[in-house]
Structures are given as C-alpha cells and as structure tokens.
Image: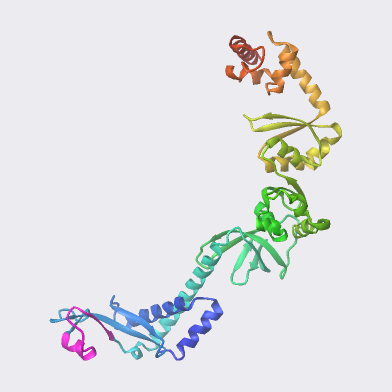
Amino acid sequence: MVLNLSKVIELIVKEKGLRQEDLVQVVEAAVQSAAKKVYGDYDNIEAQYNPGIDEVEVFQFKVIAENVDDPITQISLRTARELDPNCQIGDELGEKLDSSKLGRIAAQSAKQVIVQKVKEVERDAVYNEFIDRKWELVSGFVHRFDRRDAIVNLGKAEAILREKEMIPGETLRRGDRIQALILDVTKSLRAPQIELSRTHPKFLVKLYEMEVPEVTEGIVEVVAVAREPGVRAKIAVRSHDAKVDPVGTCVGVKGARVQNVIQELKGERQDIIIWSEDPVRFVCNALSPARVSKVIVDKTAWSMDVVVADDQLSLAIGRKGQNVRLVAKLTGWKIDVHSEHTEEIVSSEQKNALSTMEDIDESLAEVLMEAGYKTREDLAKAKEEDLIEFEGIDESLAKKLIEKASVGESEA
C-alpha cells in the first residue's frame, strides 16, 4: 500500500536516529489500526511487514473448525485447505485481507498514527540514551533562552540549564559552546527533560577528570569538593601511588591544568589540598595557607575550635568568612576560628570559672579544659566514667563535680 516503503523507513531511521525494528513495529501498528477501522475492531487482525514484497500485509487469524459457529474467529476446514492443503482442525490460519480496501481515510489515519508513534519512539530513544548518562559531563551549544533559562542543543536532544544552575556572573549568548553536568533526566509528554548544572560540586570533579589523566585512571582521587560557584572552591585529593604528588598533578606544569579549570569556571579560584583520614590534619590542610597553632576537638558536637596566630586570623577566616565556610563544607566539621590572643583571654576566663569550684585547683582545671570541659555546663553534661579516667578524680569526686556543676548552672 506504500511504494518504496523500505526507503521511507530507511530515511526516517537515519533522520531520527531510530532503530529500524522499532520503526517497522510503528508502521505495522499504524496499518493494523487502519485495517480495524475498515474490517472491524477485532483482536485477530494483525499487520506484518513483508520485506520481500516491500509491503505491510494485513491478516485475519482464524481457528480451523469442523463446524463454524463464529465466522469472525473460525474458518472451515474446506476453505482453509484451499489456502493451505496441509492444515488441520485446531490450527490457526492467517487469511490475507485486501489492503487496497483501506482507502484514503484509513491511509490518513495510518499516517497520523505513524507520526505519533515515531514521536513516542524518538522520545523513548532519547530518554533511554540520557537516563544512563546522569552525572556525565556533556557539551553543547546555547540554542535559545526561555526567560532566564538557557536551552542547550546536545545534538540528539535539547537540555535546559536553569538560571540557578549557571555560574553567578557568567553571561551566555546564543551560539556559545558550554560544558555542563547532566543533573537529572525525566520523562514528559513532549520530550524528555534533561537538566544541566554548572554549579554542582560534581561538575568540578568531572572537569578535573577531563584535564587530569591521573584522576581518570584512578591514580589520583578527588575525595571531596566544596564550592561557592564563580568565586572559590576547595578540592581534597589523595594519591594511590606514593610516587605521585596529587596536588602537583592536578595543578599541572606551570599551573596549566588548574588554569584550564579556572577558565571554564569563569575565574573560580581553586584551592587544592591533601586529604587526610585524620580529621584534625584534614582541617589544618583545608585552612591552608593559614597556619594553625592549636585545635580543640569536640567529637560529640562534631566541632573544632581552631586557634591561629593573630596575623593569620583574617587569612584563616577569609573574606566575609568564605574560607572557613568552605572548610566546614569540605570536611563536614563545624569550625570556629580564634586568634591566639583571644584564645588566651577566653581560656583564662574559663579556667578561672572552673577553678572557683570546690575540689578543682588550677592544674585540674587545665586538664579538664584540654579534654573539652571548658565550662560548668560542659562539666554538668559529663559522665562519671569519663571523669574518673583523669588522674586525681575517683568515682566519688566525679559524682560531686557533676552535681555541683549542675547546681551552678541551674542557679545561673
């Protein structure tokens, strides 16, 4: 019923990037739908593409019966043997219908079904391709804008880069070639929704994988990333080869590798630091270039009090608190930074507060403070079994200290 059907199928396959078997099924379904409009909406009507004659043939399958009770679903043995001399009662036989009877209206209906089905197959093909590429780095051209969101042409599909996923301060124009991370892929009625991001921390990881072969090969690992997009980022790396310096490898000769990343991120400054299993060392590395004098750890609150020299305080905190904020994001610890001068004043006040308690002298106050019990409140929350580990504190004294600290707190 369609001349050069094979060429039409081949053309659509190339143009839409579909699989031939999927398109053949679409054509068969369309012709079957049209045939049912002419011959009746029966379940036993099927359409099959015959490549030998380059035509979609329509068959009505019937069961061979000795006595025909339902001519729609049954055929007599005598009539059946005119079509197939070897058939037997109980066999199912396909009786070919006259496709020429489908007519113009049925053909138009078939065309509409084909167009719709091709769109569905095309939509599913795009979704199936990109759903497995989530978190991959892709490149494309800015095709147009939807309000402040950019629509990016990825070749086989369009994706959306929402304004909130753009690097602050960057200006995109039509035709710009950009790289982005596939953030999510969802199905929709029109086309799969492919969402991109240039602000996600994993986008930065993918850029280093692209620029640094050792990262792609697994010799150097990017363990953690913290970003304030467009401004500054901290990247924690480690090497799985003792001979390879992870920081130097990521920076590259004369900074070439890191500069390529910075250029892609519109000038976002990169701090590459050594990751460590020791959280204190990791925090000290992350605060670099500021030099740390002392760290007091509170594992219960998952926090650290970091003491730096007076002239290092602004460097450690960073402009508007940016450096210490990124360190907290990178390490997962709450970080409070103090200068040595401020720490001396606070420590003196705290030590005096503990020393005023009966049974605590100045030396014991120092021991308790070093262990994280800086105030009466800290002591009130302590457990007896923890305090008796300190020299000079037995079970009786531990209980008395906790009770007096609790009374002091309630009176305060």
- Position of residue 407 relative to residue 95, above or below, is above
The structure residue drawn at horizontal position 36% and vertical position 78%, both measured from the top left corner, is: 33
- Position of residue 14 relative to residue 203, above or below, is below
Q: Residue furthest left?
A: 67
Q: What stretch is highlighted in magenta?
A: 77-95
Residue 331 as seen in the image, left or right of residue 87: right
Residue 218: quarter of image: bottom right
Q: In which quarter of the image is the N terminus?
A: bottom left
Frontmost residue, 256 versus 377: 256
How far across and down, in percent of the image, does residue 86 sit? 21, 87
- How many numbered circles are shown? 0
Magenta segment: does it hold 52?
A: no
How far across and down, in percent of the image, does residue 343 sit? 79, 26
The structure residue drawn at horizontal position 54% and vertical position 69%, both measured from the top left corner, is: 126
Q: How is the image coloured?
A: rainbow
How far across and down, in percent of the image, does residue 185 sit? 55, 61
The structure residue drawn at horizontal position 30% and vertical position 83%, both measured from the top left corner, is: 59
Frontmost residue, 238 versus 25: 238
Residue 258 as seen in the image, left or right of residue 111: right
The structure residue drawn at horizontal position 28% and vertical position 77%, both measured from the top left corner, is: 44
Q: Residue furthest right?
A: 311
How far across and down, in percent of the image, does residue 171 sit? 75, 61
Q: Does residue 166 appear anywhere in the picture?
A: no
- Position of residue 228 relative to residue 184, above or below, is above
Q: Residue furthest top?
A: 358
Q: Does residue 73 appear anywhere in the picture?
A: yes
Magenta segment: does it hold 82?
A: yes
